[in-house]
Amino acid sequence: MSLSPLDSPMWQDLFGSAMARDCLGDDALVAAMIRVEVALAEACEAQGLTPEGSGARIASALSDAPLSPADLAEGAARDGVPIPALLAALRARLDAQAADALHWGATSQDIVDSATVLCLRDFAARMGTEADAVLDRLAELAGAEAETVMLARTRTQGAVPTTFGAVVADWGMGLADAKERLTEAAARLCDLSLHGAAGTDGALGARADAIRDDMAGRLGLKANPTPWHRQRTRISDFAAASAAIAMQAGRIGADLALLAATGIAELRLSGGGSSAMPHKVNPVRAEAAQSLARFAAHLQGAVTEAALHVSQRDGAAWGLEWLSLRPLCGASAAALDNIARALDGLQPNRAAMAQNLANAGIGPFSERLSYLLAAQMPRSDARDAMARALATDDPVAALRAAYPELNWTDAMDPLAAAGHAPRLARAFSTSRGPTT
Protein backbone atom coordinates (compact mmCIF):
# COMPACT_ATOMS: atom_id res chain seq x y z
CA MET A 1 0.00 0.00 0.00
CA SER A 2 1.25 3.47 -0.88
CA LEU A 3 0.35 6.67 0.95
CA SER A 4 1.58 8.97 -1.81
CA PRO A 5 0.06 9.41 -5.28
CA LEU A 6 3.62 9.98 -6.53
CA ASP A 7 4.25 6.24 -6.53
CA SER A 8 0.79 4.80 -5.90
CA PRO A 9 -0.15 2.00 -8.34
CA MET A 10 -3.49 3.79 -8.84
CA TRP A 11 -2.21 7.36 -9.24
CA GLN A 12 1.40 7.10 -10.44
CA ASP A 13 0.54 7.50 -14.15
CA LEU A 14 -1.04 10.89 -13.38
CA PHE A 15 0.88 12.21 -10.37
CA GLY A 16 4.09 10.22 -10.72
CA SER A 17 7.13 10.10 -12.97
CA ALA A 18 8.78 6.87 -14.06
CA MET A 19 11.97 8.80 -14.70
CA ALA A 20 12.02 10.26 -11.18
CA ARG A 21 11.35 6.87 -9.64
CA ASP A 22 14.20 5.42 -11.67
CA CYS A 23 16.65 8.15 -10.63
CA LEU A 24 15.54 8.83 -7.06
CA GLY A 25 13.71 5.74 -5.82
CA ASP A 26 15.04 3.59 -3.01
CA ASP A 27 16.65 1.14 -5.45
CA ALA A 28 18.62 3.98 -7.05
CA LEU A 29 19.66 5.38 -3.67
CA VAL A 30 20.84 1.99 -2.37
CA ALA A 31 22.82 1.41 -5.56
CA ALA A 32 24.41 4.85 -5.20
CA MET A 33 25.31 4.20 -1.56
CA ILE A 34 27.04 0.97 -2.54
CA ARG A 35 28.86 2.81 -5.31
CA VAL A 36 30.08 5.39 -2.77
CA GLU A 37 31.27 2.66 -0.38
CA VAL A 38 33.17 0.95 -3.21
CA ALA A 39 34.84 4.21 -4.25
CA LEU A 40 35.84 4.88 -0.63
CA ALA A 41 37.34 1.41 -0.29
CA GLU A 42 39.29 1.75 -3.53
CA ALA A 43 40.57 5.19 -2.54
CA CYS A 44 41.67 4.00 0.91
CA GLU A 45 43.56 1.09 -0.64
CA ALA A 46 45.17 3.32 -3.29
CA GLN A 47 46.36 5.69 -0.58
CA GLY A 48 47.78 2.86 1.53
CA LEU A 49 45.32 3.19 4.37
CA THR A 50 43.84 -0.30 4.01
CA PRO A 51 45.47 -3.60 2.97
CA GLU A 52 46.53 -4.11 -0.62
CA GLY A 53 43.83 -5.81 -2.67
CA SER A 54 41.01 -5.04 -0.24
CA GLY A 55 39.49 -2.34 -2.42
CA ALA A 56 39.53 -4.54 -5.49
CA ARG A 57 37.88 -7.41 -3.61
CA ILE A 58 35.21 -5.07 -2.27
CA ALA A 59 34.53 -3.71 -5.75
CA SER A 60 34.28 -7.22 -7.19
CA ALA A 61 32.01 -8.55 -4.48
CA LEU A 62 29.69 -5.56 -4.33
CA SER A 63 29.47 -4.54 -7.99
CA ASP A 64 26.22 -6.48 -8.44
CA ALA A 65 25.11 -7.00 -4.86
CA PRO A 66 21.42 -8.07 -5.00
CA LEU A 67 20.28 -5.90 -2.10
CA SER A 68 16.66 -4.85 -1.70
CA PRO A 69 15.74 -1.62 0.11
CA ALA A 70 13.28 -3.68 2.13
CA ASP A 71 16.26 -5.59 3.55
CA LEU A 72 17.35 -2.34 5.24
CA ALA A 73 13.98 -1.38 6.69
CA GLU A 74 14.40 -2.88 10.15
CA GLY A 75 17.87 -1.40 10.55
CA ALA A 76 16.79 2.01 9.28
CA ALA A 77 13.97 2.08 11.82
CA ARG A 78 16.33 1.04 14.60
CA ASP A 79 19.23 3.35 13.74
CA GLY A 80 17.44 6.22 12.03
CA VAL A 81 19.62 5.75 8.97
CA PRO A 82 20.07 2.74 6.64
CA ILE A 83 23.87 2.65 6.61
CA PRO A 84 24.56 0.29 9.56
CA ALA A 85 22.16 -2.26 8.07
CA LEU A 86 23.67 -1.72 4.63
CA LEU A 87 27.17 -2.32 5.95
CA ALA A 88 26.10 -5.50 7.74
CA ALA A 89 24.58 -6.84 4.53
CA LEU A 90 27.64 -5.89 2.48
CA ARG A 91 30.16 -7.28 4.95
CA ALA A 92 28.36 -10.62 4.81
CA ARG A 93 29.53 -10.83 1.19
CA LEU A 94 33.19 -10.09 2.01
CA ASP A 95 36.14 -11.89 3.53
CA ALA A 96 37.23 -10.69 6.98
CA GLN A 97 40.02 -8.43 5.78
CA ALA A 98 37.87 -6.72 3.13
CA ALA A 99 34.99 -6.39 5.60
CA ASP A 100 37.31 -4.51 7.98
CA ALA A 101 38.37 -2.19 5.15
CA LEU A 102 34.80 -1.25 4.23
CA HIS A 103 33.50 2.19 5.29
CA TRP A 104 36.93 3.30 6.52
CA GLY A 105 36.91 6.79 8.03
CA ALA A 106 33.36 7.66 6.96
CA THR A 107 30.15 8.35 8.84
CA SER A 108 26.64 7.43 7.73
CA GLN A 109 25.87 10.94 6.57
CA ASP A 110 28.95 10.97 4.33
CA ILE A 111 27.58 7.98 2.46
CA VAL A 112 23.95 9.10 2.25
CA ASP A 113 24.79 12.66 1.23
CA SER A 114 27.29 11.59 -1.43
CA ALA A 115 24.83 9.03 -2.81
CA THR A 116 22.05 11.62 -2.83
CA VAL A 117 24.22 13.98 -4.86
CA LEU A 118 24.84 11.25 -7.43
CA CYS A 119 21.11 10.55 -7.69
CA LEU A 120 20.15 14.22 -7.94
CA ARG A 121 22.71 14.89 -10.66
CA ASP A 122 21.36 11.96 -12.68
CA PHE A 123 17.83 13.28 -12.15
CA ALA A 124 18.81 16.78 -13.28
CA ALA A 125 20.39 15.48 -16.48
CA ARG A 126 17.33 13.46 -17.39
CA MET A 127 15.00 16.27 -16.37
CA GLY A 128 16.92 18.51 -18.75
CA THR A 129 16.38 16.05 -21.58
CA GLU A 130 12.65 15.92 -20.89
CA ALA A 131 12.46 19.71 -20.67
CA ASP A 132 14.22 19.98 -24.02
CA ALA A 133 11.58 17.77 -25.64
CA VAL A 134 8.82 20.04 -24.29
CA LEU A 135 10.71 23.14 -25.38
CA ASP A 136 11.12 21.78 -28.90
CA ARG A 137 7.36 21.17 -29.10
CA LEU A 138 6.67 24.69 -27.81
CA ALA A 139 9.10 26.17 -30.34
CA GLU A 140 7.37 24.36 -33.17
CA LEU A 141 3.97 25.58 -31.96
CA ALA A 142 5.16 29.15 -31.43
CA GLY A 143 6.53 29.35 -34.96
CA ALA A 144 3.39 27.89 -36.52
CA GLU A 145 1.09 30.24 -34.56
CA ALA A 146 3.25 33.37 -34.65
CA GLU A 147 0.52 35.39 -36.44
CA THR A 148 -2.54 33.67 -35.00
CA VAL A 149 -4.24 36.66 -33.43
CA MET A 150 -6.09 36.23 -30.15
CA LEU A 151 -7.24 38.23 -27.15
CA ALA A 152 -4.66 38.69 -24.41
CA ARG A 153 -6.11 38.53 -20.92
CA THR A 154 -4.81 40.24 -17.82
CA ARG A 155 -6.34 39.39 -14.44
CA THR A 156 -8.82 37.22 -16.41
CA GLN A 157 -10.14 40.25 -18.33
CA GLY A 158 -9.75 41.00 -22.04
CA ALA A 159 -6.76 43.27 -22.56
CA VAL A 160 -5.16 43.80 -25.98
CA PRO A 161 -4.56 41.69 -29.09
CA THR A 162 -1.65 39.26 -29.00
CA THR A 163 -0.86 36.08 -30.89
CA PHE A 164 -1.08 32.50 -29.74
CA GLY A 165 2.52 32.07 -30.84
CA ALA A 166 3.59 34.79 -28.41
CA VAL A 167 1.66 33.11 -25.58
CA VAL A 168 3.40 29.83 -26.35
CA ALA A 169 6.78 31.58 -26.55
CA ASP A 170 6.18 33.02 -23.08
CA TRP A 171 5.57 29.50 -21.78
CA GLY A 172 8.75 28.33 -23.45
CA MET A 173 10.94 31.16 -22.22
CA GLY A 174 9.86 30.54 -18.64
CA LEU A 175 10.55 26.83 -18.92
CA ALA A 176 13.91 27.43 -20.60
CA ASP A 177 14.96 29.71 -17.74
CA ALA A 178 13.88 27.12 -15.17
CA LYS A 179 15.74 24.35 -17.00
CA GLU A 180 18.91 26.48 -17.05
CA ARG A 181 18.50 27.17 -13.35
CA LEU A 182 18.28 23.43 -12.61
CA THR A 183 21.33 22.72 -14.76
CA GLU A 184 23.31 25.36 -12.87
CA ALA A 185 22.12 24.08 -9.48
CA ALA A 186 23.15 20.54 -10.44
CA ALA A 187 26.58 21.77 -11.51
CA ARG A 188 27.07 23.39 -8.08
CA LEU A 189 25.80 20.29 -6.29
CA CYS A 190 28.97 18.35 -6.96
CA ASP A 191 30.74 17.98 -3.61
CA LEU A 192 31.69 14.64 -2.17
CA SER A 193 30.90 14.28 1.54
CA LEU A 194 33.73 12.61 3.46
CA HIS A 195 34.59 14.23 6.78
CA GLY A 196 33.64 11.73 9.46
CA ALA A 197 31.38 11.86 12.46
CA ALA A 198 31.68 15.56 13.33
CA GLY A 199 33.31 16.89 10.18
CA THR A 200 36.83 16.83 11.64
CA ASP A 201 38.53 14.14 9.51
CA GLY A 202 39.42 12.49 12.81
CA ALA A 203 39.58 8.96 11.39
CA LEU A 204 41.38 9.77 8.13
CA GLY A 205 43.87 12.22 9.61
CA ALA A 206 46.70 13.42 7.40
CA ARG A 207 45.54 11.33 4.44
CA ALA A 208 42.06 12.82 4.39
CA ASP A 209 42.66 15.24 1.51
CA ALA A 210 44.35 12.64 -0.67
CA ILE A 211 41.58 10.09 -0.07
CA ARG A 212 38.90 12.68 -0.80
CA ASP A 213 40.61 13.66 -4.05
CA ASP A 214 40.94 10.03 -5.10
CA MET A 215 37.39 9.09 -4.15
CA ALA A 216 35.87 12.18 -5.76
CA GLY A 217 37.65 11.38 -9.01
CA ARG A 218 36.19 7.89 -9.04
CA LEU A 219 32.66 9.24 -8.55
CA GLY A 220 32.89 12.27 -10.84
CA LEU A 221 32.45 14.63 -7.89
CA LYS A 222 34.49 17.44 -6.38
CA ALA A 223 36.62 17.05 -3.27
CA ASN A 224 35.64 19.73 -0.77
CA PRO A 225 37.96 20.24 2.21
CA THR A 226 35.06 21.81 4.11
CA PRO A 227 32.42 19.52 5.67
CA TRP A 228 28.86 20.18 4.56
CA HIS A 229 26.95 17.98 6.98
CA ARG A 230 24.86 20.98 7.97
CA GLN A 231 25.67 23.34 5.11
CA ARG A 232 22.55 22.60 3.06
CA THR A 233 22.36 25.71 0.86
CA ARG A 234 23.15 23.84 -2.33
CA ILE A 235 20.55 21.19 -1.51
CA SER A 236 18.02 23.98 -0.94
CA ASP A 237 19.05 25.66 -4.20
CA PHE A 238 18.60 22.41 -6.09
CA ALA A 239 15.15 21.95 -4.57
CA ALA A 240 14.18 25.50 -5.52
CA ALA A 241 15.41 24.96 -9.07
CA SER A 242 13.45 21.73 -9.37
CA ALA A 243 10.38 23.49 -7.99
CA ALA A 244 10.87 26.21 -10.62
CA ILE A 245 10.37 23.58 -13.33
CA ALA A 246 7.13 22.59 -11.63
CA MET A 247 6.03 26.22 -11.38
CA GLN A 248 6.49 26.72 -15.11
CA ALA A 249 4.67 23.48 -15.88
CA GLY A 250 1.83 24.55 -13.60
CA ARG A 251 1.65 27.95 -15.24
CA ILE A 252 1.34 26.35 -18.67
CA GLY A 253 -1.30 24.00 -17.28
CA ALA A 254 -3.31 26.92 -15.90
CA ASP A 255 -3.30 28.67 -19.28
CA LEU A 256 -4.21 25.47 -21.11
CA ALA A 257 -7.18 24.88 -18.84
CA LEU A 258 -8.35 28.49 -19.15
CA LEU A 259 -8.08 28.61 -22.93
CA ALA A 260 -9.91 25.28 -23.25
CA ALA A 261 -12.72 26.37 -20.92
CA THR A 262 -16.36 26.48 -22.01
CA GLY A 263 -17.09 29.95 -23.38
CA ILE A 264 -13.49 30.48 -24.46
CA ALA A 265 -12.72 27.25 -26.34
CA GLU A 266 -9.59 28.61 -28.00
CA LEU A 267 -7.84 25.28 -27.48
CA ARG A 268 -8.98 21.70 -27.71
CA LEU A 269 -7.27 19.29 -25.34
CA SER A 270 -7.45 15.56 -25.16
CA GLY A 271 -8.69 14.73 -21.72
CA GLY A 272 -10.84 12.70 -19.42
CA GLY A 273 -14.54 12.14 -19.34
CA SER A 274 -17.13 12.66 -16.66
CA SER A 275 -18.99 9.85 -14.90
CA ALA A 276 -22.23 11.85 -15.25
CA MET A 277 -21.87 14.22 -18.24
CA PRO A 278 -20.96 12.55 -21.55
CA HIS A 279 -20.24 15.85 -23.29
CA LYS A 280 -17.34 16.85 -21.03
CA VAL A 281 -13.64 16.57 -21.87
CA ASN A 282 -11.87 17.60 -18.69
CA PRO A 283 -8.36 19.13 -18.92
CA VAL A 284 -6.93 16.40 -16.71
CA ARG A 285 -3.25 16.78 -17.59
CA ALA A 286 -3.38 20.57 -17.28
CA GLU A 287 -5.06 20.26 -13.89
CA ALA A 288 -2.57 17.67 -12.64
CA ALA A 289 0.35 19.92 -13.60
CA GLN A 290 -1.12 22.70 -11.47
CA SER A 291 -1.73 20.39 -8.51
CA LEU A 292 1.82 19.08 -8.68
CA ALA A 293 3.27 22.58 -8.98
CA ARG A 294 1.48 23.69 -5.84
CA PHE A 295 2.60 20.53 -4.03
CA ALA A 296 6.21 21.17 -5.08
CA ALA A 297 5.96 24.74 -3.77
CA HIS A 298 4.93 23.45 -0.33
CA LEU A 299 7.72 20.88 -0.32
CA GLN A 300 10.26 23.53 -1.24
CA GLY A 301 9.46 25.26 2.04
CA ALA A 302 10.09 21.99 3.87
CA VAL A 303 13.49 21.51 2.20
CA THR A 304 14.43 25.07 3.11
CA GLU A 305 13.34 24.49 6.70
CA ALA A 306 15.40 21.30 6.77
CA ALA A 307 18.52 23.45 6.33
CA LEU A 308 18.14 24.59 9.97
CA HIS A 309 20.58 22.17 11.60
CA VAL A 310 21.41 22.16 15.30
CA SER A 311 24.93 21.05 16.34
CA GLN A 312 27.37 19.37 13.96
CA ARG A 313 24.74 16.93 12.66
CA ASP A 314 20.99 17.04 13.11
CA GLY A 315 18.88 13.91 12.64
CA ALA A 316 15.56 15.74 12.79
CA ALA A 317 16.53 18.22 10.09
CA TRP A 318 18.05 15.46 7.98
CA GLY A 319 14.84 13.43 8.30
CA LEU A 320 12.74 16.37 7.09
CA GLU A 321 15.02 16.64 4.07
CA TRP A 322 14.46 12.96 3.29
CA LEU A 323 10.69 13.43 3.60
CA SER A 324 10.57 16.38 1.21
CA LEU A 325 13.50 16.50 -1.26
CA ARG A 326 12.89 13.43 -3.37
CA PRO A 327 9.08 13.89 -3.42
CA LEU A 328 9.60 17.48 -4.55
CA CYS A 329 11.75 16.34 -7.46
CA GLY A 330 9.24 13.62 -8.29
CA ALA A 331 6.39 16.14 -8.32
CA SER A 332 8.35 18.47 -10.59
CA ALA A 333 9.11 15.70 -13.05
CA ALA A 334 5.46 14.58 -13.05
CA ALA A 335 4.26 18.16 -13.62
CA LEU A 336 6.50 18.47 -16.67
CA ASP A 337 5.42 15.06 -17.94
CA ASN A 338 1.77 16.08 -17.72
CA ILE A 339 2.46 19.18 -19.79
CA ALA A 340 4.25 17.10 -22.41
CA ARG A 341 1.19 14.85 -22.63
CA ALA A 342 -1.20 17.81 -22.75
CA LEU A 343 0.74 19.37 -25.62
CA ASP A 344 0.58 16.11 -27.56
CA GLY A 345 -3.21 16.42 -27.72
CA LEU A 346 -3.44 20.20 -28.15
CA GLN A 347 -5.32 21.69 -31.12
CA PRO A 348 -5.55 25.49 -31.49
CA ASN A 349 -9.02 26.72 -32.43
CA ARG A 350 -8.04 29.72 -34.55
CA ALA A 351 -11.62 30.58 -35.44
CA ALA A 352 -12.56 30.84 -31.77
CA MET A 353 -9.51 33.00 -31.08
CA ALA A 354 -10.52 35.42 -33.84
CA GLN A 355 -14.18 35.42 -32.78
CA ASN A 356 -13.43 36.06 -29.10
CA LEU A 357 -11.27 39.01 -30.08
CA ALA A 358 -14.01 40.37 -32.35
CA ASN A 359 -16.63 39.90 -29.63
CA ALA A 360 -14.58 42.09 -27.31
CA GLY A 361 -15.28 45.06 -29.57
CA ILE A 362 -13.17 48.17 -29.43
CA GLY A 363 -11.87 47.54 -25.92
CA PRO A 364 -8.74 45.61 -26.93
CA PHE A 365 -7.85 48.41 -29.36
CA SER A 366 -8.41 51.32 -26.96
CA GLU A 367 -4.79 51.52 -25.89
CA ARG A 368 -3.57 51.56 -29.51
CA LEU A 369 -6.17 54.17 -30.50
CA SER A 370 -5.24 56.37 -27.55
CA TYR A 371 -1.61 56.45 -28.65
CA LEU A 372 -2.53 57.07 -32.30
CA LEU A 373 -4.64 60.03 -31.21
CA ALA A 374 -1.85 61.21 -28.91
CA ALA A 375 0.28 61.75 -32.02
CA GLN A 376 -2.15 64.55 -32.95
CA MET A 377 -3.04 66.05 -29.56
CA PRO A 378 -1.95 66.07 -25.93
CA ARG A 379 -2.13 62.62 -24.42
CA SER A 380 -4.67 63.71 -21.79
CA ASP A 381 -6.96 64.93 -24.57
CA ALA A 382 -6.54 61.60 -26.38
CA ARG A 383 -7.59 59.72 -23.25
CA ASP A 384 -10.62 61.99 -22.85
CA ALA A 385 -11.57 61.39 -26.50
CA MET A 386 -11.41 57.63 -25.97
CA ALA A 387 -13.49 57.89 -22.81
CA ARG A 388 -16.20 59.87 -24.63
CA ALA A 389 -16.27 57.37 -27.48
CA LEU A 390 -16.45 54.38 -25.15
CA ALA A 391 -19.50 55.94 -23.48
CA THR A 392 -21.44 55.83 -26.78
CA ASP A 393 -23.38 52.93 -28.27
CA ASP A 394 -20.94 52.66 -31.20
CA PRO A 395 -17.45 53.83 -30.10
CA VAL A 396 -15.83 53.04 -33.47
CA ALA A 397 -18.40 55.07 -35.39
CA ALA A 398 -18.01 57.96 -32.95
CA LEU A 399 -14.22 57.98 -33.34
CA ARG A 400 -14.37 57.61 -37.11
CA ALA A 401 -16.69 60.60 -37.33
CA ALA A 402 -14.53 62.72 -35.01
CA TYR A 403 -11.15 61.71 -36.48
CA PRO A 404 -11.59 60.68 -40.13
CA GLU A 405 -7.94 61.44 -40.84
CA LEU A 406 -6.77 58.33 -38.94
CA ASN A 407 -5.82 55.29 -40.99
CA TRP A 408 -8.68 53.20 -39.64
CA THR A 409 -7.74 50.07 -41.55
CA ASP A 410 -4.38 50.03 -39.78
CA ALA A 411 -5.79 51.25 -36.46
CA MET A 412 -8.20 48.33 -36.20
CA ASP A 413 -5.87 45.70 -37.67
CA PRO A 414 -5.55 42.99 -34.97
CA LEU A 415 -2.11 41.87 -36.13
CA ALA A 416 -0.79 45.44 -36.13
CA ALA A 417 -2.32 45.94 -32.68
CA ALA A 418 -0.49 42.82 -31.48
CA GLY A 419 2.77 44.77 -31.81
CA HIS A 420 5.89 42.65 -31.50
CA ALA A 421 4.01 39.48 -30.54
CA PRO A 422 4.80 37.71 -33.85
CA ARG A 423 8.45 38.68 -33.53
CA LEU A 424 8.60 37.31 -29.98
CA ALA A 425 7.08 34.04 -31.15
CA ARG A 426 9.52 33.65 -34.02
CA ALA A 427 12.50 34.62 -31.88
CA PHE A 428 11.70 31.86 -29.42
CA SER A 429 10.99 29.39 -32.19
CA THR A 430 14.26 30.00 -34.00
CA SER A 431 16.20 29.90 -30.71
CA ARG A 432 15.33 26.22 -30.50
CA GLY A 433 16.18 25.32 -34.10
CA PRO A 434 15.23 26.01 -37.71
CA THR A 435 12.46 28.50 -38.43
CA THR A 436 9.09 26.81 -38.36
Image: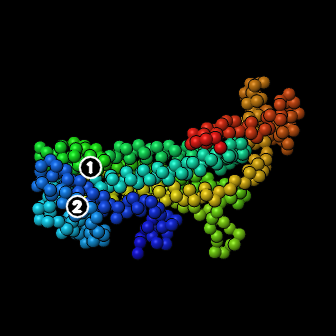
Instruction: Give residue 130's position: percent from left, percent from top.
Output: 50, 53
Q: Quadrant of residue 298?
A: bottom left
Q: For the point 85% across and 42% down, which residue is it?
A: 394
Instruction: Give residue 417's position: percent from left, percent from top.
Output: 73, 37
Q: For the point 57% across and 48% down, which residue is it?
A: 136
**On the rendered image, what quadrant is the C terminus found in?**
top right
Identity, as a three-letter code, of the amino acid under mark 1: Arg
Q: Quadrant of residue 418?
A: top right
* Element type at mark 2: helix
- Check disc 2: other Cα within 10 Å, few if <14, some if 14-19, many if 20+: few
* Element type at mark 1: helix
Does residue 26 sit above or below 233 in this rendering? below
Q: Sequence-wise, which precedes: disc 1 or disc 2?
A: 2
**In this orientation, does residue 287 appear?**
no
**In this orientation, does residue 49 appear?**
yes
Judge depth for marks 1 and 2 and give the one in front. Answer: 2
Q: Nearer the viewer, residue 320 or 102?
A: 102
Q: For the point 38% across and 59% down, which residue is it?
A: 24
Does residue 176 sit above or below 82 in this rendering? above
Q: Is residue 333 left or right of residue 271?
A: left
Instruction: Give residue 156's position: percent from left, percent from top.
Output: 65, 50
Labels 1 & 2 near each other (Cβ < 8 A): no
For label 2, the residue is 60
- Cα distance in 3D space between marks 1 and 2: 15 Å
- Check disc 1: other Cα within 10 Å, few if <14, some if 14-19, many if 20+: some
**On the rendered image, what quadrant is the N terminus found in?**
bottom left
Q: Is residue 227 left or right of residue 149?
A: left
Identity, as a three-letter code, of the amino acid under mark 2: Ser
Instruction: Give residue 300's position: percent from left, percent from top.
Output: 41, 53
For label 1, the residue is 218
Q: Is residue 341 left or right of residue 362?
A: left
